[in-house]
Image (spheres, grey):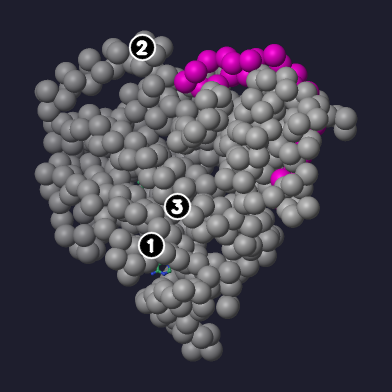
């Protein structure tokens, strides 16, 4: 084998997954068809749950240092408020995708991830023991194939890996076209608000550097061929059509196009091949969710794939990746379809936006939309009945014998944590069987109640089992917990107990 896992694509999803696998000691190679990073701005920000995930790995400060926290988010351009009680990181961070990718790549390099540029996946052969990945490569000295136990396609919306593995990508066709460019706009009025609706479409201009703007124009019922090149002249003409002027647009650094085409892979796994990020789902980029979802896919998959590669958990654990993440993808596709309907031009949509906007002042409506965007309310399917089971663990303040700590600090090593908040003999006894792969931490909670988005405050648990992705596998509020339920959860997620 050349590696345990080959990842196709060094975008945000592929890089995050590579880091997760390396943290778990897995040998991983990322193959990327580009010769080097493009520096394209694309995504403009990351939401709460992704900020939490980065905090769980101890690298959040790097991202905070390069971005700017935003006081509000938006659903189809209508403002959504965030709630400080729900998370240590309630606000979205405005940071360009180019910076996110650079920071992830720096972290990956520190962890020993190998990235092979100019290496395009062009063929796949699966058998019982592994996957042979064929590479079209510009370098004659590198082998044209790589052999690994698993291949993960993080190769974007047009994923070659998805097509080669015969995974269907059903969904809906594009009904509009958006052009995007990083340009200078010297004649933009000073009182310009970031987005304007016009009779034939809409346009937005967001400053990202002094004098520089990310301009997006959207026009409806015009869908060019996907392979038609995009030019600066097209962007200028489109801006003139919707805004009546080009605001002196000049010096394009990057021009691209996107649509509201919405599709999702029917399966996230086909044998030894898995899909994550845009390779598994594409949608209208409204409310800034695609990159976030890709990073969260990676964090869900990473520890599971590592456990299977290390031989600790059965291969069937990988099926929980589809079971947990496919419904999350469906929900995002659903809300972005709704958002794309809400931006279409016309008097009917204007009225609909007006009604929708007046509903958003109600707390319940605002909360519902906030959770669609920030993903703090996600609950994976679970058998247990404790309200934390299946949800992301709240980042509570704890006290240990070594001093204060918060829950996410315990997850920096990307290992499962069995958190005992009462010093229970049953929990300590159960933990012994998994001592090689689950960290037992004894602590006390600072607070009697913990905030749980979508539920409210709940009594602090007495013990809980936290997966490396920060989701709760088992929790109890009993003083004398049911050790058999805990053992079942440990076996389900982390494989059988040590012998003896
Ligand atoms: C205008 C716009 C604004 C957006 N704003 C946001 C936002 O604010 N927040 C947000 O969360 N998301 C946003 N998104 C979405 C976000 O950009 C994508 O969801 C994100 O890039 C997906 O990351 P990925 O790593 O899955 O795929 P990609 O970023 O597409 O990366 C895939 C990588 O795979 C490589 N590749 C492709 N084929 C092969 C092959 N055969 N072999 C090897 N390598 C290959 C590609 O070169 C690329 O580097 C926005 C998108 C657009 C267009």
For the N terminus, the quadrant is bottom right
Going 65% across and 35% down the picture, which residue do you hit? 484
Q: Position of residue 313 (x, y in %)?
A: 59, 55
Is residue 288 rendered magenta in the image?
no
Q: Which residue is mark 1?
A: 270
Image quarter where ligand 1 lies: bottom left
Relative depth, front residue between 325 and 157: 325
Left or right of 232? Residue 297 is right
Q: Earlier in the sequence, mark 3 or mark 1?
A: 1
Circles 2 and 1 in contact, beta carbons < 8 Å? no
Identify the secondary structure beneath mark 2. Answer: loop
Find out if the beta carbon at label 2 lies less than 8 Å from the nearest ligand 1 atom: no
Left or right of 167? Residue 347 is left
Q: Is residue 358 visible?
A: yes
The span picked out in magenta is 437-459
Q: Position of residue 294 (x, y in %)?
A: 45, 48
Label number found at residue 169: none
Q: Which residue is mark 2?
A: 361
Q: Earlier in the sequence, mark 2 or mark 1?
A: 1
């Amino acid at each position: 084998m050349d590696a345990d896992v080959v990842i196709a694509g060094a975008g945000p999803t592929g890089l995050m997954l590579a880091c997760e696998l390396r943290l778990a000691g897995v040998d991983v190679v990322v193959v990327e068809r580009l010769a080097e990073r493009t520096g394209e701005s694309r995504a403009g920000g990351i939401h709460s749950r992704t900020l939490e995930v980065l905090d769980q790995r101890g690298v959040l400060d790097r991202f905070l240092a390069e971005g700017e926290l935003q006081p509000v988010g938006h659903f189809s351009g209508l403002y959504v408020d965030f709630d400080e009680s729900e998370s240590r990181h309630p606000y979205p961070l405005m940071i360009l995708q180019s910076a996110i990718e650079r920071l992830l790549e720096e972290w990956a390099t520190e962890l020993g991830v190998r990235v092979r540029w100019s290496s395009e996946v062009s063929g796949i052969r699966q058998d019982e023991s592994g996957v042979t990945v064929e590479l079209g490569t510009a370098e004659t000295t590198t082998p044209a194939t790589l052999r690994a136990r698993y291949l993960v396609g993080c190769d974007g919306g047009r994923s070659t890996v998805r097509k080669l593995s015969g995974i269907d990508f059903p969904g809906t066709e594009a009904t509009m076209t958006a052009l995007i460019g990083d340009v200078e706009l010297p004649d933009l009025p000073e009182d310009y608000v970031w987005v304007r609706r016009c009779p034939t479409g809409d346009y937005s201009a967001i400053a990202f550097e002094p004098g520089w703007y990310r301009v997006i124009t959207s026009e409806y019922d015009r869908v060019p061929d996907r392979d038609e090149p995009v030019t600066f002249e097209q962007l200028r003409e489109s801006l003139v059509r919707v805004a009546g002027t080009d605001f002196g647009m000049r010096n394009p650094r990057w021009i691209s196009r996107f649509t509201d085409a919405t599709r999702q892979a029917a399966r996230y796994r086909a044998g030894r091949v898995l899909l994550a990020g845009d390779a598994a789902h594409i949608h209208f980029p409204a409310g800034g969710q695609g990159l976030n979802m890709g990073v969260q896919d990676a964090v869900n998959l990473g520890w599971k794939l590592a456990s299977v590669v290390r031989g600790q958990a059965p291969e069937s654990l990988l099926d929980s990746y589809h079971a947990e993440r496919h419904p999350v993808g469906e929900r995002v596709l659903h809300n972005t379809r709704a958002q794309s309907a809400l931006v279409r031009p016309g008097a009917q949509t204007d009225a609909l936006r007006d009604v929708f906007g007046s509903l958003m002042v109600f707390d319940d409506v605002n909360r519902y939309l906030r959770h669609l965007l920030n993903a703090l309310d996600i609950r994976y399917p679970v058998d247990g009945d404790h309200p934390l089971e299946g949800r992301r663990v709240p980042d509570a303040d704890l006290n240990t014998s070594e001093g204060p700590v918060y829950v996410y600090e315990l997850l920096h090593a990307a290992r499962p944590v069995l958190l005992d908040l009462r010093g229970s003999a049953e929990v300590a006894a159960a933990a012994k069987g998994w001592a090689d792969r689950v960290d037992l931490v004894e602590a006390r909670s600072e607070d009697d109640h913990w905030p749980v988005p979508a539920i409210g405050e709940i009594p602090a648990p007495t013990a809980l089992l936290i997966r490396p992705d920060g989701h709760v596998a088992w929790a109890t509020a009993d003083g004398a917990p049911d050790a058999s339920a805990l053992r079942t959860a440990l076996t389900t997620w982390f494989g059988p107990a040590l012998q003896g």
